Image (tube, helix red, strand yellow):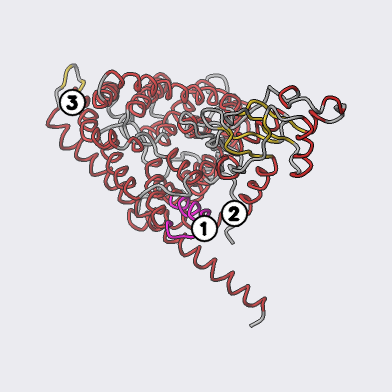
Amino acid sequence: MDRGEWDLQRYVEKWSVLLGIAAVAGLVGGLGAIAFRLLIEGFHSLFFFKVLPAVSYEVGGINLGYILLPVLGALLIAPLVKKYPELRGNGVPEVIEGVIFKSGKIGAKLALLKTIATAISIGSGAPLGREGPAAFIGAALDSALAEKLPKPQARKLITTCGLAAGIAGTFNTPLAGAMFALEVIYMGAITINLVPIFVSAIIGNAITLVVLHQPARFPILNPNISVLEGLPFYFILGIILGLIGYAYTRALYMATDFFDAFSDRYSFEIRLLVGALGVGLIGMLLPSQGIFGIGFGGIKEALLGKFTLEMLIILALAKMTATLLAISSGFSGGIFAPSLFIGTMLGSAFGMVISHFAHANVEAYALAGMAGFFSAATQAPLTQIIMITEMSGSYAYSPAVALTSVVAFITARVFFRGSSIYTIKLERRGIRVKTGRPLLLETIVVHEIMTDEAVKIHMKRPLMEVEKVIASTGHDFLPVVDDEGRVVGIIGVPDILGKPTSLKKLPVERVMRREFVVVNPNETAQDALDKILMNDQNLLPVVDNERKLIGVVTKKDIYRAYYEAIEGMYLY
């Protein structure tokens, strides 16, 4: 066997193994999505068809029993989410953190607990979605599957495959599931590494169709519709939804801050019950319009034109408020489905307004609104463009959907500045994640690349010694330290160049730079690079909390780390 044949055989073997693991990841993620969906249906039946009749009490045609359903759900999940805060919310930020900063590690135990907490939350009426938790569950299960893989990038990729399979299995949209994984999670993807993600998404979708036979589809009234004449209005709709999507995201985290402060004075259980009561009150007034639970029924009715303009606005505001209460108080569930609901109502309302003075197909504005609001909040426009095409089974609406989605995305990005509804949660914990760019230097910590035995100079040494140290080491900058080893300045070639001989007997402290920047060992390589470039300082002293020197990091160290990270992204 010659070398060419041997290389081909190794190439085939490696890809066979990788795609085989991706197929298993898709199967695991799909099965997790199936179990999750069935569990939600089971709890929904329990709460709404068994518990509700037992607690029903009508006053003026309003069933007060609806208030108790989210409250009962809150009581059931409170012990879980109190002990495991990672279970709160949609789970996508935790997947981002696991893939980017923890080599794909999430934990299968959390998948099981997330399944239970979210199924109870949504089943009892929390106005949240199943897709974010389904993605978390798929990613967590496949994270356990990937632990034995030797290469960190392979582990990250397989974990991402699980997320793609979970999304695809939830919506029966394999392309959108894969695109969501690429836009939101697997930032900086190398083209050849995308194949396993698509394989997993397709298998995750296929397994749910085989088992559940329930493809998710929107009711489309006119598959031959033309939306081109309304493109200026879709552009305006995109701007409006971009602004609302940003405001909604900020309101979500303001509400979270409020409940955090609230729980400092009261117990977490009280916090969750307050949110549950708010959800119950809103849902009690609109029990059959999609406020409770996922809300797909309300979306379908809006697409069929069954709501008045006033009702569309009321439903959008009600779902916004109920979702903010549920997520910020601590329920477990996704923001994907609520975003689709809110966007549908806003888009339909906008279409109705336009129809008063121009020809307008309201269902087209509903789909465009669905795409625009989601794209603004999540900063993932391609996912929504593809998803609506898959779920509608028609390309006729694509120009409207694509234009609104992209304009909303760009409008919101002006204010988000690279953040999103998912990444803000991480940024508030000090984890730097920006959408739309490869995350390489952000995943590398300074203490991993710094030089421990740093070359330094004492502040009392004569300036001529700096020349000798620079000549012998090749360093163009040196940290200056005092008797206790604290960094008090830096000195470099520009500071001593051209100095007369008479001055070279002066102590370093007379010439050193007293305005300089340092870095701590837990900051990222991106932080270090930003400081170097902004301060014209080729070397950064690495200091501890007492400002004592523990190492240095240079521009060369950062560049080397960058190229090693690039190399590591290629699996084979």
Which residue is farthest left? 54
Question: Where does residue 119 sit, x and y in percent of width and height?
Answer: 28, 41
Mark 1 is surrounded, within 10 Å at the Cα level, by few (under 14), some (14 to 19) or many (20 or more) other residues, namely: some
**Which sits in the foreground, 299 or 358?**
299
Q: Amino acid at mark 2?
A: Gly
Question: Where does residue 38 sit, x and y in percent of width and height?
Answer: 28, 48
Q: Are marks 3 and 1 in contact (CB under 8 Å)?
A: no
Question: What segment is highlighted magenta in the picture?
Answer: 146-162
The quarter in which the C terminus is drawn is bottom right
The residue tagged 3 is 65
The reply to whether residue 268 is in sight is yes
Residue 424 located left or right of residue 455: left
Q: Are marks 1 and 2 in contact (CB under 8 Å)?
A: yes
Residue 83 located left or right of residue 198: left
The secondary structure making up most of the magenta span is helix
Q: Amino acid at mark 1?
A: Lys
Mark 3 is surrounded, within 10 Å at the Cα level, by few (under 14), some (14 to 19) or many (20 or more) other residues, namely: some
Magenta run includes residue 239: no
Magenta run includes residue 152: yes
**Which sits in the foreground, 516 or 86?**
516
The residue tagged 1 is 151
Q: Residue at x 75, y 32 (%)?
A: 492
Q: Is residue 357 above or below residue 365?
A: above
In the picture, the disc for residue 568 is: 2
The reply to whether residue 363 is in sight is no
Mark 2 is surrounded, within 10 Å at the Cα level, by few (under 14), some (14 to 19) or many (20 or more) other residues, namely: some
User: Could you say whether the residue bearing mark 1 is in a helix, strand or loop?
Assistant: loop
Whole-number angstrom distance, CA of label 1 to CA of label 2: 9 Å
Total numbered labels placed on residues in the image:
3
**Which sits in the foreground, 542 or 74?**
542
Q: Quadrant of residue 65?
A: top left
Q: Quadrant of residue 134?
A: top left
